[in-house]
Structure formats: structure tokens, C-alpha cells
């Protein structure tokens, strides 16, 4: 059988879900999203509330979330 040249929408959906899980699935993003679901917080307030996160990791997490919209 020859490979089909037709476009598979299921593949696109799987790819989209995979991209979302890659972003939201990391430990720090889940914690930040949970905290921000109650409303905006300042950077240092987030850092104090999330025990164990470094300033650099919080910065990278927030930048990634901002980039991803």
C-alpha cells in the first residue's frame, strides 16, 4: 500500500494536545497557574508562596507562559 497524501486532522489534534501538555505539564507551570487562578500576584509574592522555586526558574516559567499566551 502506498502512503496516503491526504491530510489527517486527527494528527493535527494530537499534535496540538501534545504541545499544550508540554507547556502545562511541567511542575512549576502547574503551580503558577494554580496560584494565578485566584488573581494577579507580584513576582516576589509568587516566589515566596511557591517554596523551592529559584528566581531564575520562576522567571523562565513566567516568560514561557507569557510567550505561549
Image (tube, rainbow, N blue to C red):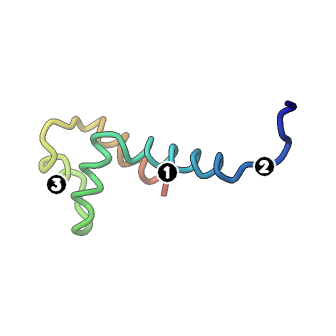
Which element type, helix, strand or loop, lies under badge 3?
A: helix
Q: Which mark is residue 7?
A: 2
- Using the image, tell me which numbered label, if any, was put on residue 45: 3
In space, the residues marked 1 and 3 are separated at their CA atoms by: 21 Å
Q: Is residue 59 left or right of residue 65?
A: left
Determine which of the numbered discs, if any, sits on residue 51 in the image: none
Query: Which residue is under mark 1?
Result: 67
Mark 2 or mark 1: which comes first in sequence? 2
Give the spatial CA distance, label 3 vs label 2: 47 Å
- 58 and 19: which is toward the camera: 19
Give the Cα distance between marks 2 and 1: 29 Å
Q: Residue at x 44, y 41 (%)?
A: 22
Residue sitting at the far front:
1
Q: Position of residue 56 (x, y in %)?
A: 30, 35
Nearest the eye: 15 or 3? 3
- Residue at 69% over, 53% down: 9
Q: At 25% across and 38% down in the image, what residue appears?
A: 55
Q: Residues within 10 Å of mark 2 (few under 14, many from 20)?
A: few
Q: What residue do we see at 83% from left, 34% from top? A: 3
- Numbered-mark total: 3
Q: Quadrant of the N terminus?
A: top right
Q: Earlier in the sequence, mark 1 or mark 3?
A: 3
Amino acid at each position: 500500500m502506498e502512503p496516503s497524501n491526504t491530510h489527517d486532522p486527527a494528527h493535527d489534534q494530537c499534535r496540538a494536545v501534545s504541545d499544550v501538555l508540554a507547556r502545562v505539564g511541567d511542575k512549576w507551570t502547574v503551580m503558577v497557574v494554580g496560584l494565578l487562578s485566584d488573581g494577579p500576584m507580584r513576582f516576589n509574592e509568587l516566589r515566596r508562596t511557591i517554596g523551592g522555586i529559584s528566581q531564575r526558574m520562576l522567571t523562565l516559567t513566567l516568560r514561557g507562559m507569557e510567550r505561549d499566551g
